[in-house]
Every structure is written in structure tokens, then in C-alpha cells.
Image (cartoon, grey):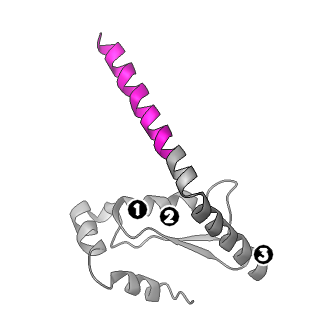
Amino acid sequence: MQNGRHTSLMRTYAEQVAGLIGRIGSEEADAIGAAAELIADHITRHGADRLIYVYGPGGHSNLAAQEVFFRAGGLVNVSAILDEGTLLSGGALRSMAIERTPGYGRVVIEDNRLGA
């Protein structure tokens, strides 16, 4: 009985996740397409020597930046901004406090010498 319950929970969870991913794909298709066009334009207009910066503003949001950084078969000109202050490895409560600090994102941008 226990295994049947676990299988049912797993199936329900997988269905819910698949549904949410499908919903994101349909509701955000225009925004995702626009972002893809901006990135492609940046690469083709400026050449492969220009970086595309990705930033996760704190906690688990850093995972999104890590996901596209230095992946086999991925874009080589992606640079992840992984700020030590917001990484969970420094402590979850510390990360949460820093990501809520007004103006902290501006400090990260300036520290990484990002332009327009």
C-alpha cells in the first residue's frame, strides 16, 4: 500500500510540474521569444567576444544564473554573476538579509563593472 501511495504522489507531482511548465510556455511565449531575440541580436551584432551576463539576485534565484553558465554545448560567452553575499553557501539567513538590502544590486553591478 505504501508504494502505491508514493507512486500516486509522484505521478500527481509530475503532472503538476508538467502543467506549470506548459502554462509558462504558453503565457510567457512572447516574453521568452523577445528575450531570445535580444540575446541573439547581441551576439550577432557584437560578435562572440561580448559577454551575456546573467544574475540571480539571491538564494535559490542564483540557480537560474548557474544553470546557463558554463554548460556543455551551451553558449560560451555567458558570464554568471554569482555574488558571494547572496549565495546560500554563506548561510540562508545571511543570503536572505543581503538580497533584501536596498541598493545591493547596484553595488553588484558596479563591482562587476557592467555598462549599459
On the image, which quarter does residue 98 sit in?
Answer: bottom left
Q: Is residue 76 above or below residue 113?
A: above
Q: Is residue 22 above or below residue 64?
A: above
Element assignment for label 1: helix
- The answer to whether the residues at label 2 and label 1 have Cβ atoms under 8 Å apart is yes
Residue at left offset 57%, top offset 51%: 26
Q: Magenta span covers which residues?
A: 1-21
Label annotation for residue 61: 1
- Judged from this view, the residue extending furthest toward the top is 1
- The answer to whether the residues at label 3 and label 2 have Cβ atoms under 8 Å apart is no
Would residue 65 be found to the left or right of residue 2 on screen? right
Residue at left offset 32%, top offset 61%: 88
Would residue 59 be found to the left or right of residue 27 on screen? left
Label annotation for residue 65: 2
Residue type at numbered disc 1 = Ser
Q: Is residue 21 above or below residue 102?
A: above
Residue type at numbered disc 3 = Thr
On the image, which quarter does residue 40 sit in?
Answer: bottom right
Q: Which numbered disc, 3 or 1, marks the residue that appears first in the sequence?
A: 3
Q: CA distance from mark 2 to mark 1?
A: 7 Å
Question: Which residue corresponds to mark 3?
Answer: 44
Mark 3 surroundings: few (<14), some (14-19) or many (≥20) residues within 10 A: few
